[in-house]
């Protein structure tokens, strides 16, 4: 069987999967979704010229003869509207965000003034017109596209959505995902420990990988090696947008799952991808003529680490594309190797590593045995070090690329110089 | 007022906040929680010596005379128990993960064999004892601590928890968080647009920042500038583990919220922190004698960007510490500046930037106006570029440190060489 490059397999997947429809979501439930419509400003912000500081609003021309003693004619707090127009030698005490009084064109912050009496203040600074004033519409003008369709909803975006009073908004809907494990050797969570069996970890690791993308998947359970039972499970799974099947064994997926799933109308492609851990990977599409919609099936290796790595490289990008997110690939960082790595060239290798840091940046070190059954090495990993297929190994200190895994949005150290 | 360093203010906060108690959580709801107990292996994995490949189990000594034709005496699939003990010249067809038959001590993968007939196969390789065999207990041994207390539950960790059949487990409980905005100038989400008012974006941006940490906060609403109303809101807020108060204006928080909250028994510390945007920041502790528990209050600036940045630098680390997570700080990456940055030394500056990448790594460029009212610049940001307090500016191409914000777990490009 031909060995595809990772990017080739991704390209074939991306050619099939498209953005799903959109749905309305409440602001409180929108974090991580992607806007499917442009969001327009519904007001000017600031709504008028406002002070950028706590201080005194003045006529900047009055400052030419600094130091000058001003008479304080009004106190303007945020939320107040000023009532007094400033004349020469007058100022208004003003709070950050409060509207500028008529006549004033600059603000002197309180730290740069000296209180002389309850209603007089001395200012020794000379500033230009507009100093520490935020101009009407500086942040947004009514009708502006403030957030274009395709924007991922982050906390900062939610702040902007609240600013334009978007209590709900159209977002691309999240795919509905079902997860199926197959194989007589699997032991379900609620079954007693049987040393002849393998605990079904794949369903749960895949569940968590899907959850980490903001999608709550459905676990279908374990289909035993029985064609009738398998067909029933697959039929249920094909009701979802995406069905993840983690195979009993590599040959089993191809020889056993394939005929049943193709019988149900799924056009399956099986590949060996030139990556380690990984192969084989299966991808299929079922066009549902009656619903004008499609189901996508991913056949993942039965080996726990291979299944997780294939999810990250192929399934996660596909799910994010369906959700309308332009960011499809895991964040990468550059690190130095803490130890040499041997490699037989031919396939791109993903090595589970922990990251630490020193003044020169990140250091990557293996989490231990890289056997594809060693799920613990995945549990301990901060990232996947990517060894290019043409590499014959790397030496201590060599620069390498590491894909960050979940749980790495935060780190142990502050990481910057104050 | 003294200007504290960021790390000093963090240290004072960390001295007060401690890990909360633990609670039981189902595996399906555990992603992002932190284990409060060690997790022990409940079985050996693999449970016996198993094949690491699809191929043929052989007696390695038989291979000395390679090429050798073997008689296939049994088919062993994953989940099967072998029944035939291998004699000289015999092999068993074996699947990945299936138990090794008695007598066999090595596996030759199918690609390295030639089928001669239905029950004979030729092998031309010489391998050592143990080749492509995974030894019993290689991945975990019954009684081993496989996951120590303090481990953040990632998808890989969930895979391991499922492996040891942990359908539920003890985790540190998440803090209960309430969010209160204060100020007459604020316009609630359900109120009509009034140009004299400021939309209440802070409550929602803070909500989303808390949600991004896996905590569902309670929004208390807006307390107007009325001592009785404020006291009622604060009393409600102090029922939670953490109360976030985003202040109307900077002076208002100190002069207005402080006396009311101190009257309720909260010991408040107010600081100016040597950072921009940021000050002032308030932090307080209330010891509840009747409940043997504490409430923590953070007073955040009213300015939307300042509020968000203070949350990231002070509140997020405190909440993560309470959840038992050893990773307190946002992930940082090194980038090159795409343009010069001017700076007046004295305070650590956080500049909202977008990240792009080229072959030499990340490039950081400003998201536009850095006014602390410009929430859009936060919505567009991938990260916060940190300018050290002693800097007088940086030039194009200078190396800088960028804290990654939410929404940056994924990126636009694959980011590695295959």
Image (tube, coloured by chain):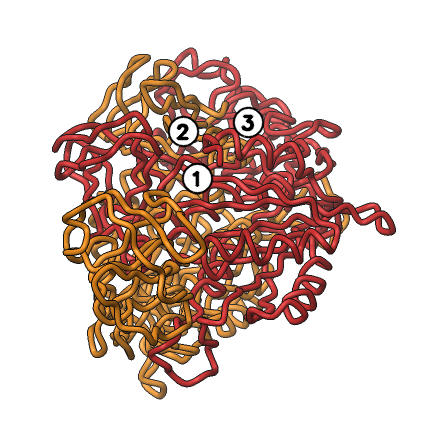
Chain colours: A orange, B red
Tell me whether circle 1 and circle 2 mark residues in contact (CB < 8 Å): yes
Within 10 Å of disc 2 (Cα), the crowding (few <14, some 14-19, many 20+) is many
Furthest-right residue in this view: B290
The residue that mark 3 highlights is B134
Disc 2 secondary structure class: loop
Can the viewer see residue B267? yes
Measured from the top left, where is residue A258 in percent x and y?
40, 60
Between disc 1 and disc 3, the foreground one is 1
Nearer the observer, A275 or B374: B374
Question: Whole-percent x and y of residue A216?
Answer: 52, 64
In this figure, which residue is indicated by the disc labeled 1? B330
Task: Return the chain for callout 1.
Answer: B
Q: In this view, does A224 lie to the left or right of A56?
A: right
Q: Name the residue under label 2.
A: A415
Residue A306 drawn above or below residue A22: above
Residue drawn at x 43%, y 11% as measured from the top left: B64
Question: Is disc 1 in the same subunit as disc 3?
Answer: yes
**Depth check, front residue: A31 or A137:** A137
């Amino acid at each position: 069987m031909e060995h595809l490059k990772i990017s080739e397999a991704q390209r074939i997947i991306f050619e099939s999967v498209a953005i799903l429809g959109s749905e309305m979501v409440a602001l409180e439930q929108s974090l991580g979704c992607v806007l499917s419509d442009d969001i327009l400003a519904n007001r000017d912000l600031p709504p008028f010229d406002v002070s950028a500081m706590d201080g005194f609003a003045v006529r900047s021309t009055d400052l030419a003869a600094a130091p000058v003693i001003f008479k304080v004619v009004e106190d303007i707090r945020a939320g107040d509207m000023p009532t007094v127009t400033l004349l020469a030698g007058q100022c208004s005490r003003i709070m950050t965000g409060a509207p500028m009084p008529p006549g004033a064109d600059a603000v002197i912050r309180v730290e740069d003034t000296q209180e002389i009496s309850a209603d007089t203040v001395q200012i020794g600074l000379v500033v230009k017109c507009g100093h520490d004033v935020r101009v009407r519409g500086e942040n947004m003008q009514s009708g502006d596209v403030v957030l274009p369709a395709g924007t991922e909803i982050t906390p900062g975006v939610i702040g902007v959505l609240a600013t334009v009073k978007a209590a709900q908004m159209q977002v691309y809907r999240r795919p509905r995902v079902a997860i199926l494990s197959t194989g007589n050797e699997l032991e379900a969570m609620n079954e007693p420990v049987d040393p002849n069996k393998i605990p079904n970890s794949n369903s749960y690791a895949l569940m968590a990988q899907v959850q980490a993308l903001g999608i709550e998947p459905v676990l279908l359970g374990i289909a035993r090696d029985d064609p009738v039972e398998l067909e029933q499970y697959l039929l249920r799974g094909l009701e979802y947008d995406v069905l993840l099947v983690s195979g009993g064994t590599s040959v089993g997926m191809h020889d056993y799952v394939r005929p049943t799933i193709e019988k149900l109308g799924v056009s399956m492609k099986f590949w060996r991808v030139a990556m380690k851990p990984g192969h084989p990977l299966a991808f299929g599409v079922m066009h549902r003529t009656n619903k004008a919609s499609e189901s996508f099936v991913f056949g993942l290796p039965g080996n726990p680490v291979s299944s997780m790595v294939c999810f990250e490289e192929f399934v996660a990008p596909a799910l994010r594309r369906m959700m309308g997110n332009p960011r499809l690939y895991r964040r990468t960082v550059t690190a130095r190797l803490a130890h040499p790595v041997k490699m037989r060239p031919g396939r791109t290798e993903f090595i589970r590593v922990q990251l630490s840091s020193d003044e020169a940046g990140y250091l990557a070190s293996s989490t231990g045995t890289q056997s594809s059954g060693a799920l613990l090495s995945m549990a301990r990993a901060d990232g996947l070090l990517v060894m290019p297929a043409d590499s014959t190994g790397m030496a201590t200190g060599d620069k390498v690329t590491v894909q960050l895994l979940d749980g790495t949005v935060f780190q142990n150290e502050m990481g910057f110089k104050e």
